[in-house]
Image (spheres, rainbow, N blue to C red):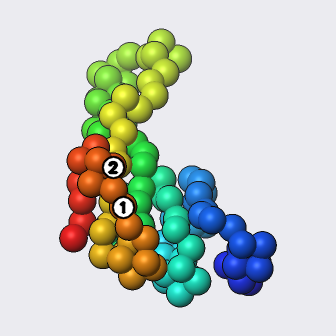
Amino acid sequence: MAFVSLTDVQANALVVAPNALFSTQAHQLVALAARHAVPTLYWRREFTQAGGLMSYGSNLADALHTIGVYSARILKGEKPGDLPVQQPTKFELVVNVKAAKAIGLAIPESFLARADEVIE
């Protein structure tokens, strides 16, 4: 229903923000975006790997590594409150050219050159 509304209001694109519900519905969101030909930007590469147009966000593997390091520090006796708050420092742009072609979107080579990964 939301994608039909996007078409009705002639939205040019959609940004899917981080959300636990959206994480569990990645394939459904990607399929709906493709069915309604709505260019969509996701926050995790898994959406793009599932056929979504593009994603820009932090690297999940890096975040999990940081969690492991912090867990080890806590298990060795450091107090969690003494550990500094960390934010992601590595962000990645993933573009799915096949998805772009499917919705009739041409992505400039200069933009693709900036991507960390291009899915053909």
Query: Marks 2 and 1: CB-CB under 8 Å?
Result: yes
Q: In the figure, 1 relative to 90: above or below?
A: below
Q: Amino acid at mark 1?
A: Ile
- Determine which residue is flagged by label 1: 107
Q: Position of residue 28 (x, y in %)?
A: 52, 81
Q: In the figure, 86 relative to 118: above or below?
A: above
From the viewer's perspective, tell me whether residue 109 is left or right of residue 86.
left
Using a 10 Å C-alpha cutoff, classify the residue at mark 1 as few (fewer than 14 neighbours), some (14 to 19) or many (20 or more). few
Q: Position of residue 59 (x, y in %)?
A: 34, 45
Using a 10 Å C-alpha cutoff, classify the residue at mark 2 as few (fewer than 14 neighbours), some (14 to 19) or many (20 or more). few
Q: Nearer the viewer, residue 47 or 110?
A: 110
- Determine which residue is flagged by label 2: 111
For the question of whether residue 115 can be seen, the reply is no
Q: Position of residue 91 (x, y in %)?
A: 36, 39
**Alpha carbon separation for disc pair 2 and 1:** 7 Å
- Quadrant of res 105: bottom left
Q: Amino acid at mark 2?
A: Phe
From the viewer's perspective, tell me whether residue 41 is left or right of residue 101.
right
From the viewer's perspective, tell me whether residue 48 is left or right of residue 82.
left
Give the position of the C terminus as an image quadrant: bottom left
- Quadrant of res 2: bottom right
Q: Residue at x 58, y 60 (%)?
A: 16
